[in-house]
Image (cartoon, rainbow, N blue to C red):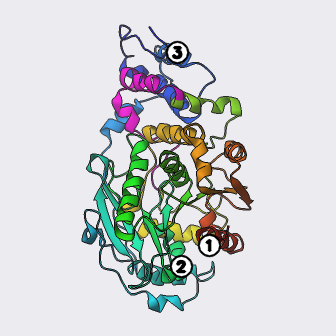
Amino acid sequence: MGDGAISKTQGPPPPATLATAKDVLDSALRVGLAMSPRALAEKALAEAQQPPPTNLTQSPIANTVAKTLAPTPPTQGTNRPESFPFSAGANGQLSPVGDFKRFLALPDPTEKTLASSRPMLFDYMHTGQFGEFAGDQGVAIRYIVFAPPPGVPIKGVINLVQGTRESMAKYAEFLFNLRDLRAQGYVIATMDHRGQGFSGKEFPDRLHIENRQQLIDDEIKFREILVQHFGAQVPYTAIGHSLGAAVAAREVEQHPDHYRSLILLAPMLNMQTGHTDTVEKLAAVAFEADHLLTHLQTDVLGQASAHERAPGETAYNPALPFDGNGRTHSRARFAFAEQTYRDFPDTQIDGITRQWFAEGVKLGREVQTQQASNLSLAHTHILLAKEDSYVENHNTVQLADRLELRRTYWPSKHELLHAPDDVRTHVMNYLRQVITGQL
C-alpha cells in the first residue's frame, strides 16, 4: 500500500465513530499535523476505531444530511437598493450605460457621511453596465463595468478582483471613488466570484468550489470579455484583495501578458490559523497530498464531508458585532458592509466548505511555488496590513524579497480598502499612482 493510500479491506468505521475520524480531517484541513500523509492516514483510521466521545449525541454528518437548506429570507427595510440588471448583458455582453456626469461634482464620502451617502452610492452603481457569462459547469458569473463617456478614448482597464464572501455591492464606495478616472478614459470593472456575491452558487448557504483553477479561469474569461469590448492594446491593471490577490497572482503567473500592473492587497498566500508554526504545517498536507484528502473524504467520512462547512465556520449572523472583528478599525465601513449583506440576501454566506478551505490553501501555496518568477514581469506592488489576523505576512514578505517586488506595510487590519479615512486615503492615492503609471 503506497503512501497516502487507505486499505479498503478494513472498511469504513461504524457510523457512531465517524465523528472521531471527522475531527482528524477537520484538523488536517484547518491547521495540519507535522506528519507524513501515510502517518496521518494511519492516525485517522486508528482513531476512527475508538469509542465516540461521551458527550456526542449524534454524528455531525447525520446532522448535515438531516439539515434542510433554506435561503435566508430577505431583510425588510427602507431605502433598500434596487436589484442589478445582470441578464441585460447576457453571454458576455453589457447592459446600456448610464450617465454619470452628475456624480462628478459630488464629494467622496467620509466615515462621517458614508451612511447617509449610501443611496447615492447605489444610484451611481446603476450608471455601470451589467452582464453575466457561464463559467465552468455552467455557473453564472456576474459583473459590472464602468466605461468612460462615449467619445472618450480608452486609457486603461482596472479590474478589481474581490476577496472571500465579497460582492460588487460591498465595493460601492471604492467604485464611486474612481469616477474621475472613469471620466478620463479608464474602465473600472469587477466580477463576483462563483459561490458568492451575485454569482451562481452550488449551495445557497455555503461558499464552495470544486477546484481553485475555476476561480482563475473565471477571471481569465472576464478579462477576455473586457478585451472584446475595450481592446487589448491599453494597459490592464489588476487590484486583488485577499483571495482575489492570490487569484490575480496565479493568473499573471499563468499569463504574464494579461496585466501591466498587479496590486496585491493583503494577499491570501498563507491563512492565519492561530496555531504555532509547527502545527500550521497541517496546511501543507492539503497541498502535498490531494490523494490522501480524497481517500479520507470518500473512504472514511463519505463524499458529503467535502461539502460541509469547514471547522470554525458558522451561520450568517445578521447582527455581527463590530468589537473584535478582524476586518477593519472603521466602524462606519464595517456597518456599511454588514448593511449591504442585509440589503442583498443573495450575498449572505454561512461559511466556507472544507473543500473550499483545502483549495484556498493550495492556491496560496501555488502562488509561491508555481511560475512565481512571472510576477516580476508585471509591475507588482504588494500592500500588507500590519494588524492582519486573517493572513500570515511572513511568507509573502519572503516571496516579495526573493523576486524584488515592491512591498509596503500599512497600519490597518485585513481590509485596506475599508480602513479608516486616515489610512484609506493614502492607500487610494497609492493605487492611483500605480494605475496612472506614476509608480
Name the residue: 41% across, 33% down. 60
Mark 3 vs mark 1, CA separation in Å: 50 Å
Residue 46, percent from left and from top? 50, 13
Mark 2 vs mark 3, CA separation in Å: 55 Å
Mark 2 vs mark 1, CA separation in Å: 9 Å
Q: Are marks 2 and 1 in contact (CB under 8 Å)?
A: yes
Name the residue: 59% across, 30% down. 282
**Alpha-carbon neighbours of circle 3 within 10 Å: few (<14), some, or many (≥20)?**
some
Q: Are marks 2 and 3 in contact (CB under 8 Å)?
A: no
- Given residues 364 and 51, the one toward you in this image is 364
Determine which residue is flagged by label 2: 181
Residue 341, percent from left and from top? 45, 65
- Sequence order check, earlier mark of 2 and 1: 2
**Alpha-carbon neighbours of circle 2 within 10 Å: few (<14), some, or many (≥20)?**
some
Residue 376, percent from left and from top? 62, 50
Label number found at residue 432: 1
Label number found at residue 38: 3
